[in-house]
Image (spheres, rainbow, N blue to C red):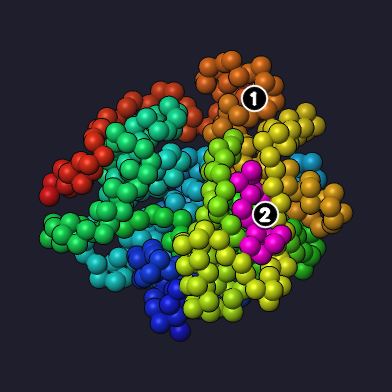
Amino acid sequence: MDLIYRSTRNDKETATASQAILKGLAGQGGLFVPERIPRLDVPFEELSRMTYQELAYEVMKLFLTDFTEDELKSCIRSAYDKKFDTPGIAELVKKDGAWFLELFHGSTIAFKDMALSILPYLLTTSARKNNIKNEIVILTATSGDTGKAALAGFADVPGTKIIVFYPKNGVSPIQEKQMVTQRGKNTYVVGIHGNFDDAQTGVKKMFSDPELADEMDKAGYQFSSANSINIGRLVPQIVYYVYSYVQLLGRGEISPGEEINIVVPTGNFGNILAAYYAKNMGLPAAKLICASNENKVLFDFFKTGCYDRNRDFILTSSPSMDILISSNLERLIYQIAGEDAKKNLSFMKELNEKGIYTITDTMKSRLKDFYGNYADEEETAAAIRDMYRETGYIMDTHTAVASAVYKKYLSETGDLTKTVIASTASPYKFSRSVMRAIDPAFDSREDFELVDELCRLSGVKIPQAIEDIRTAPVLHDTVCGKEDMCKEVKRILSL
Ligand SMILES: *Cc1c(COP(=O)(O)O)cnc(C)c1O
């Protein structure tokens, strides 16, 4: 029998996995959650002998039950290939008493590649399964990183086009270069005269324009989104937590049944939620350690049970965690509310209207798997510097937040459980902040001098993604007014 997905805001709204992937978001802003979390049904010893791709199949088939074996294996094969610069897809390296699970070996050298490399295939397979003949047009507004990861994931995937809008003067020069050099016959990158909110608003307007949808349909197109709340992004993220565990088992670092702790640098709560799902599947995980930067909404939430977004938004050196509303937390709220959509809906209404809600004591008692803490900018820089001096290993700023929080956890609890730290980006992606942390004098250097210096210090080869920025030709130079975004989409699709 197929695993059914339900909306967190309306338990009458259900979908199969492929329908949930196609829809992305449920009605009334709800998120799709599996009706139950499936249990891993292959012994860990057996899993420990599998490749990443084989393991991915064993995990994902339990969630995507309406995909055939051939369909799912084909998605996995297309996603986890030479785009990754290591045959293991993810790497596990031990430094300073913890294992760093490097999730940045994909084409944009950050962990979003783990899911965005497979989402396009899950999406086109889902379309086929549901008899959708239209070509899928991914429409995204980006403030930088997600846009590039989505472009790389969808580039040249048959049956798709991807159009990314970014604020022409609102992303870093490196981020812009990454996007405008994107290859692929089906990729379109458009700068707008406006800020990120303008881009976001323009995209949302197009998504909810029935006339445009009609015109698109007649021409054989329909929109979809690559948003991080799609279960097609969540499910692939469960795989690497299981992978890290069975790797440790296979190497004899842990004994069968031994529990591990997992530390995750968190923004939208998607990555750590995947770890929680892995635990619920039967992965022997003890504590899930949620690491925040100075935007510490989640730290406060785990401490007090009160989620409060009414505070200043702080720009930090770990920008992918600069978030005040962690969308995926809703899935956890729904679960600890006893899978009660009405109750969840009332919290989300409060969040929407007042920016704040407080969970009940019973709900709070169900959060014992989690520990939350945060690292400020100085602590983050110190973590990078100290790790480099002691081991020669260089962490990116996001991973450094996690590492600093892990140190706090250790000194608070003395818990010596073996620990995996999700390492979410290559240091090359944030060379300036990383090098500045090691020595403030580096700050006067040019971007690519810093890249070369980082290579010299770390001994880690400069990734292709960085070399590309240096040398790749600009392939996209379209710029439009913020009121002309729809016109631009029509031009691209020849409507
Ligand atoms: C997106 C991102 C995060 C945050 O992950 P969430 O799933 O949003 O919690 C952390 N680090 C990096 C480098 C990211 O790109």
Q: Position of residue 277 (x, y in %)?
A: 60, 67
Q: Nearer the viewer, residue 34 or 183?
A: 34
Q: Amino acid at mark 2?
A: Phe
Residue at 67% from the left image edge and 21% from the top image edge: 440
Q: What residue is shown with label 2?
A: 299
Q: Amino acid at mark 1?
A: Arg
Residue 426 visible in image: no
Where on the picture, by quarter, is residue 120? bottom left
Picture layout, residue 359 above or below residue 215? below
Q: Is residue 243 left or right of residue 320?
A: right
Q: What residue is shown with label 1?
A: 436
Q: Which mark is residue 52?
A: none
Residue segment shown in magenta: 288-306
Residue at 63% from the left image edge and 30% from the top image edge: 434
Q: Secondary structure at mark 2?
A: helix
Q: Alpha carbon of mark 2 to alpha carbon of mark 1: how far?
A: 27 Å
Q: Are marks 2 and 1 in contact (CB under 8 Å)?
A: no
